[in-house]
Image (cartoon, rainbow, N blue to C red):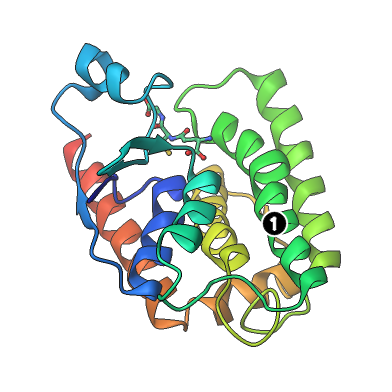
Amino acid sequence: MELISLPVSPFAARVRIAIYAKGLPIDVVPPPAEWRDSRHFRDLCPTGRIPVLLDECGPIWESAVLLDYLEERFPQAPSLMPVDVFERAQARLLVRHVDLYLMPPMVVLARPRGDAVSSRQAVEELLNGVTMLDGLLKGSQYALCDRLTIADCALAPALFAIRVTAGRLGMDLIEPGSITEAYGELCRRDPHVGRVIEEMEAGLRELVQVT
Ligand SMILES: N[C@@H](CCC(=O)N[C@@H](CS)C(=O)NCC(=O)O)C(=O)O
């Protein structure tokens, strides 16, 4: 089984954290050359986006779906879902929060040459998403319970990407001293999260050298 992934993609990063934390026999591989224009890649994944899991049964995409799929596909592996049913809903809610309120404005801001109006709007949306997140986190190492869950898999790479984008724009998108900032630092101490953040950092360094 293979995961088509790129080191810097926060969506792929969340799935890699899950693969490492669960100790799954899945090889992490880069996309084929020219994947963005590749008919073959579109045949595998019609959205043309990364990550894609190449399962024996066929390809599966959408990172949030993949987090759920890995839970069900490998029931013997350590679970990344809380036991408590309410906390399970909260874990899914935090993944949704990342996908609905953090990543969309982040993606707009990460574009090399965004127009001023959409950038201003994206900053506002992102600040709003981070403020909401502050109210959902406790400031401890993990978002829920006392161990890694799918919520951390989604949150940690997204917050890393937001910090990088904020640095590039020269603005604080995550308030210094806030619960979200503390969580981002603490969560990184988890070995699997730390490993993936390091992969993202290395990928970024490589990108900077290439461009
Ligand atoms: N909703 C998708 C989003 C995936 C996504 O947007 N991936 C980016 C990489 S971070 C991508 O492949 N973009 C297409 C491109 O770079 O051309 C998911 O959760 O998997």
Residue 88's x, y, as percent?
72, 67
Task: Kindly tell me whether residue 178 is visible in this rendering.
Answer: no
Quadrant of the rendered image containing residue 57: top left
Give the x, y percent position of residue 94. Answer: 71, 58
Residue at 69 percent across and 21 percent down: it is 118
Q: Across the whole image, how many numbered discs are drawn on residues?
A: 1
Question: Going 77% across and 48% down the picture, which residue do you hit?
Answer: 129
On whether ligand 1 comes within 8 Å of the CB at mark 1, the answer is: no
Residue 59 visible in the displayed image:
yes
Locate residue 156 relative to residue 208 in the image: left or right. right
Instruction: Check disc 1 and report the residue beneath it.
Output: 92
- 93 or 176, which is in the foreground? 93
Report the residue at 54% width, 71% height from top.
80
Relative placement, left or right, of 128 versus 77 is: right
**In x, y percent, where is residue 180?**
70, 68
In the picture, the quarter occupied by the C terminus is: top left
Q: Is residue 154 above or below residue 47?
A: below
Q: Residue furthest bottom?
A: 146
Disc 1 element: helix
Residue 181 locus on image (x, y percent): 66, 70
User: Quadrant of residue 194 in the image?
Assistant: bottom left
Q: Quadrant of ligand 1?
A: top left
Q: Viewer-proximal residue, 138 or 67?
A: 67
